Amino acid sequence: MTKPGIPKGTRDFSPAEMAKRNYIFGVIRSVFENYGFRQIETPSMENLSTLMGKYGEEGDKLLFKILNSGDWAHDLQDEELLGRNSIRLTNRISEKGLRYDLTVPFARYVVQHRDEVTFPFKRYQIQPVWRADRPQKGRYREFFQCDADVVGSDSLLYEAEMIEMIDQAFRKFGFPVTIKVNNRKILAGIAELIDAAEKIVEITVAIDKLDKIGMEGVTKELAERGLSDGQIEKLKPVILLQGNNQEKIASLRETLKGITIAEKGLDEMEFVMKCVGESDIENKVEIDLTLARGLNYYTGTILEVKADNVEMGSISGGGRYDNLTGIFGMEGVSGVGFSFGADRIYDVLTMLNLFPEEAQRGTKLIFLAFDQKGIEYSLPMVRKARRAGIATEIYPEPAKMKKQMTYANNNNIPFVAIVGDNEMAEGKVMLKNMVSGEQTLMTIEEIIDKIL
C-alpha cells in the first residue's frame, strides 16, 4: 500500500511544533494589540478578479487557481480544449483562487465594508496564504502571514509606529535584526535623475535583487531591461551610497535637488527617521536605497527586516500603498502596513535555540496509577488541578509503570504524580520532577502551589 503524502511546499506540524508556532503568533498578536490593532479574517479563496493584476506579472503566475465546481468542462467547445491556450482556458474554467497575500484581500474588505468601518481603520490578520512558487529552504507554497495595516490616514506617524512594533516584537523574540527603510518616491526620483522615469518598475525589480545576485548581476539585468551603460553608471553610486542615515539623506538632497518627487520622499524619510530616533528602539534602523520590494502597489515608505548573523531572507516587510483601494473603486484612501514572516521567524528561533521552555510544553502534570483503584482516586485531583489552570492529564489505564513513564517522557511533561497503595493510604501522591528527578510526597493543594 502506497504511503500517503502531502504536496511539495506544504508541511504537517506536530504538537511540539504547534506549541512553538503558537508562541510566535502570541508574541506578534500581543504587539499588534498593544498598538491598537484589531483582528479580522477573510476567506482563504477570493474571486480571481480580486487577485489578478495586483502583484505584477510575476505575481499573477504564482496564483493558485481553483477549478469551478460541478461539470466545469460542460460549456467548453472542442476547439478550446484542443487549442491548448492555458490562459484563455483558465479564465473559462476558474473563477476563484487562493489568496496570495493578506493585503489585497484586506483592501477588498475595506471597500466592501466601507459603511461599517471607522477611519483610520487598524486591523491585523494571522492567516495562511498560498503561492505556486518553487519550494526551497525558507520558501513554502503554503505559509502564514501576520499582517498589520492602517487605512484612511496619510500620517507618517504610522510608519514610525510600525518600525517600533517590529523592534518590540524582535526584542521579545530575543534576537537582533536590522530594519531597512527606503521610499519609493526617492527611487522614482533616482529613475528621473538618470532619464529613465518610464523604467521605474524595471529598475526597482532589478536593484531589489542586489543582495542575491550582486552588482554585476544587477548591471546585467538593468542592461537587459533597456538601460544604457551611461544610465547604469550614473545609477550605481546612488544606490550604493555609504554613510549613516543623516549623511545619506544629506547626500541625496544634494544629488536629487530639484526633482520634486524625490524631495517629497526625502521629507517623508526624514520625518520617519526623526520619530524613530526619539523612541527607545534597540534594533538597527538603516536607510538602504537598494531596498525596492517588487510589489507594484507600494508608493511611499518601504520596510524590510533581516535577522543579524543568520543566513535567512527577509523576515518582515511592508510599506505605504496610497492607491491600493482605488483598484476596487474607492479612491483617496491611503494605507500603510507590514507583515511578519512567521515561518522564517520559526526557523531563526530554531537555529538560535531561542524558544523559551514554556513554549515547548503542553501538559504540565500527569497522574500515573498502578491499578484501576488508583485511577479513580486520582480523578478528583486531576479535576482540581485543571480548575486551578494547570494543564493536566491522567494515563487512562493501569499499564506497566515503565510504559506510563515513557509516555510522560516522550511528551515532555515536567511533573508526574505517581499513585500507589502507600500514597492513597496517606491521602497524597508522589510528585516527581522529571527534570531534576526529585520525588516528594504531597497533597494536591501542595502540588498546585508548587507548579503555579
Image (spheres, rainbow, N blue to C red):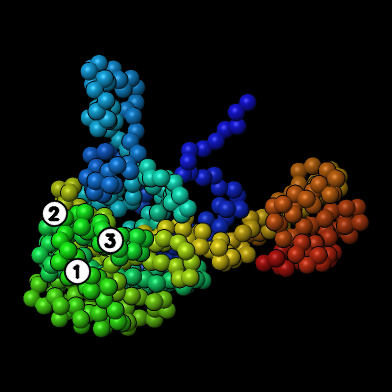
Q: Secondary structure at mark 1?
A: helix
Of mark 1 and mark 2, the one earlier in the sequence is 1
Residue 1 sits in quarter = top right
Q: Which residue is tagged 3? A: 218
Q: Which residue is tagged 1? A: 233
Query: Looking at the picture, which amino acid does disc 1 mark?
Result: Glu
Relative height, residue 96 to residue 92 (above, below): below
Quarter of the image that includes the C terminus = bottom right
Of mark 3 and mark 2, the one earlier in the sequence is 3
Q: Which numbered mark, 1 or 2, is in the foreground of this view?
A: 1
Instruction: Report the side of 155 relative to 449 (left or right).
Output: left
Residue 136 or 376: which is nearer the viewer?
A: 136
Q: Position of residue 428 (x, y in %)?
A: 84, 60
Q: Position of residue 123 (x, y in %)?
A: 33, 58
- Of the numbered discs in the image, which one, if any, rests on residue 331? 2
**Residue at (15% x, 66% y) in the render:** 230
Q: Secondary structure at mark 2?
A: loop
